[in-house]
Image (cartoon, rainbow, N blue to C red):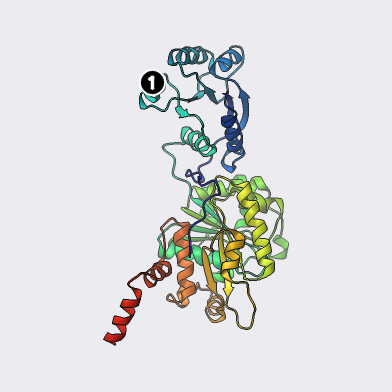
Amino acid sequence: MSDAATPKGGENVTTGSQPIPRITLHAFMEKAVDRQNLSAACSDRRMVRVTNEVHEGSVANAAEHYSDQPTPNLLIVDVPQDREKAFAYLQTLAEACDPGTQVVVVGTLNDVGVYRDFMRQGISEYLVSPVSSVQFIETIANIYANPGAQPLGKVHCFAGVKGGVGSSTIAHNVAWHMAETLGESTVVLDLDLAFGTLGLNFNHDGGKGITEALLEPDRLDDVLLERLLFKAYDKLALFTAPASLDAGFDPAPKALEKVLDVVKANFAHIIIDLPHSWAGWARGVILASDEIVLSMTPDLTSLRNAKSLNDFLISQRPNDVAPRIALNMMEAPKRPEIPVKEISDTLGAAPAAILGYDNVLFGTAANNGQMASEVDAKNKNSLALLDLANILARRGLGHSAIAAAKDTSPLAPLLALLKGLKA
């Protein structure tokens, strides 16, 4: 098991799913690299609500431009290296700024004294050029963070690279571990409205649940949310789908956004069980998630689809961790399969979870409306699912990974010999 899933650039945003509100952002920067990085930041999923204009120029151009025009909510400007000139231009700009406009200054001097001098001028932040896209995103997110607001839950989207790869089973088991083993408040959203299995897997008859919320999202508040959810365990709630053909429809993207906003304010972890679909709304959900888990089996179709999805998601989410891969149904009897090493080489990363073929464990759990660990907590698949929950919850390695590390330590052969002698 591996939790290595960093972007190719090596840097990712740490602000999670804290949204940047609907603001206007203008920038005047002389260096092309800073303008390019800010433009890239503005295309990040956290900045979709931000209206932006990026211009070539400096604080002097900004002061002149806004002398007879209203200023935006956030203004980012380059300043000259000469501090006296910089402060003079900033003073002129301040006189033109509307109340409430935040100003971020980009300079070339990397010095604590310089930073303090600029902060005394009343600016919101001082950044040293060149500024990366991630720095821009985190700076803007920090400026507009509400200190009194509750931290928002993290969204983990589980999707199969093709039908029948066990994505729903993996999602439900990971959610169970987050709630029952790790003690984190967790909710599962079943977005397969016509054929969802969330209710069945937790031995619950289901109900309108998620459908009612999606049809009338403006009515959804904390009180209605509690009424629509089914509390499966003390820390685990279910947003079930009706699993009825009459209920099958494509959710409106705005409705999904509204529902997720309410849910994120009430739970630490939101597990989205996404059906195998590439409709616009499904793409929007997966691209906006904090973490993505792609489930696959060791066959050629799965590998092709996983490669396509993995490359697409990495390119569209350059400031996020790469999707995690859950490799399911390994070592099925009499079935040829692609080796793990070839899968890892093709995808550019080792799977985050490897699950063996076990009809007895998962069949028994499904028929009883239980999770794998409720049937056999010591089963290697149960431990692999716990490991994946640990990775997503940022708890580090789980039981099976720790055990594997111990087994591969330099002392492992000696310990094994001593155990044999004692026996």
- Horizontal and vertical percent for residue 142? 46, 35
Disc 1: CA contacts within 10 A as few (<14), some (14-19) or many (>=20): few
- The number of numbered discs placed on residues in the rendered structure image is 1
User: Which is nearer the eye, 215 or 183?
Assistant: 183
322 sits to left or right of 115? right
318 lies above or below 345: above
Q: Is residue 215 visible?
A: no
- Horizontal and vertical percent for residue 387? 45, 65
- Horizontal and vertical percent for residue 39? 61, 34
Q: Quadrant of residue 38?
A: top right
24 sits to left or right of 374? right
Q: Is residue 121 visible?
A: yes
Most extreme residue toward the bottom is 423
Quadrant, the C terminus? bottom left
The residue positioned 38% from the left and 20% from the top of the image is 117
User: Which is nearer the eye, 317 or 203?
Assistant: 317
Q: Quadrant of residue 248?
A: bottom right
The residue positioned 51% from the left and 63% from the top of the image is 352
Q: What residue sits right under mark 1 in the picture? A: 117
119 lies above or below 148: above
87 lies above or below 24: above
User: Which is nearer the eye, 292 or 302?
Assistant: 302
Asked which secondary structure carries label 1, the reply is helix
Most extreme residue toward the left is 422
Residue type at tag 1 = Asp
- Horizontal and vertical percent for residue 258? 59, 46
